[in-house]
Amino acid sequence: MDNRLTPYVEKMGKTLSNLEEEFKTIRAGRANPAILNKVRVDYYGSPVPISQVGNITVPEARILQIAPWEPNMIKEIVKAINIADIGINPNTDGKVIRLIFPELTEERRKELTKEVKKKGEEAKVAVRNIRRDADKSFKKLKDEISEDEVADLQDELQKETDKKVKEVDKMVEEKSKDILTV
């Protein structure tokens, strides 16, 4: 691959990585600690990831349990989860915090599938925008390289774009299947 393509292909790869991270936060009826990745707890004035103030476990398929290392952090963790608005109300017994995920209804599964498709579409648009930006920069190279080389770069970039779009479609299909599986 031409090294002039590398930065654009890397950007497309980052777009796919971001999509994968977003898909981890969409719950499919099972408890997944990744849903807490964006939750930040106020730890003595500093916002830190929840995993740095307690141990996160999955004792049952639909329950996440957070055991804070310091008992006085329970209030802060509950507050952070409520602020993050992940759609689950934390329960606490004073020692641990439990997040109980309800069974997903058929209607909710369909909504989540629509959300997955929307995020997939946004990722494809981002990939195509990267291709468009690359095309513009290649056209500016016409003074330095031949038109054939520019055309070759554009062809190679189009192949990479098509490959990334197919990967997005595959990711959307897998996540949708995961959500719709009861």
Image (cartoon, helix red, strand yellow):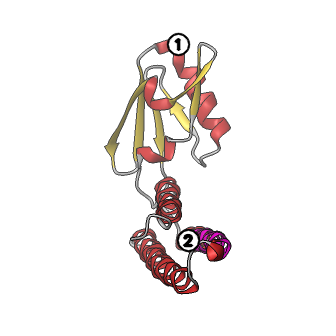
Q: Residue at x 46, y 76 (%)?
A: 160
> From this viewpoint, is residue 135 visible?
no
Q: Position of residue 177 (x, y in %)?
A: 41, 75
Label 1 CA crowd tier, 10 Å (few <14, some 14–19, many 20+):
few
Magenta span covers which residues?
123-140
Q: Residue at x 46, y 59 (%)?
A: 20
Of tags 1 and 2, the one toward the viewer is 2
Q: Position of residue 91 (x, y in %)?
A: 52, 34
Q: Quadrant of the N terminus?
A: bottom left
Place residue 181 in its image quadrant: bottom left
Instruction: Name the N-terminal-most of marks 1 and 2.
Output: 1
Residue to which mark 1 is pinned: 72
**In the depicted view, which residue is nearer to us: 133 or 121?**
133
Separation (CA) of disc 1 from disc 2: 41 Å
**Residue 107 belongs to magenta span:** no
Q: Residue at x 47, y 45 (%)?
A: 100
Q: Position of residue 109 (x, y in %)?
A: 53, 70
Quick check: 144 left or right of 57?
A: right
As drawn, 82 above or below 123: above
At numbered mark 2, what does the secondary structure look like: helix, strand or loop?
helix
Q: Residue at x 57, y 26 (%)?
A: 41
Place residue 135 in its image quadrant: bottom right
Label 2 CA crowd tier, 10 Å (few <14, some 14–19, many 20+):
many
Residue to which mark 2 is pinned: 120
> From this viewpoint, is residue 70 visible?
yes
- Amino acid beneath label 2: Gly
Quick check: 32 left or right of 8?
A: left
At numbered mark 1, what does the secondary structure look like: helix, strand or loop?
helix
Provide the major secondary structure of the magenta segment: helix
Q: Position of residue 86 (x, y in %)?
A: 59, 47
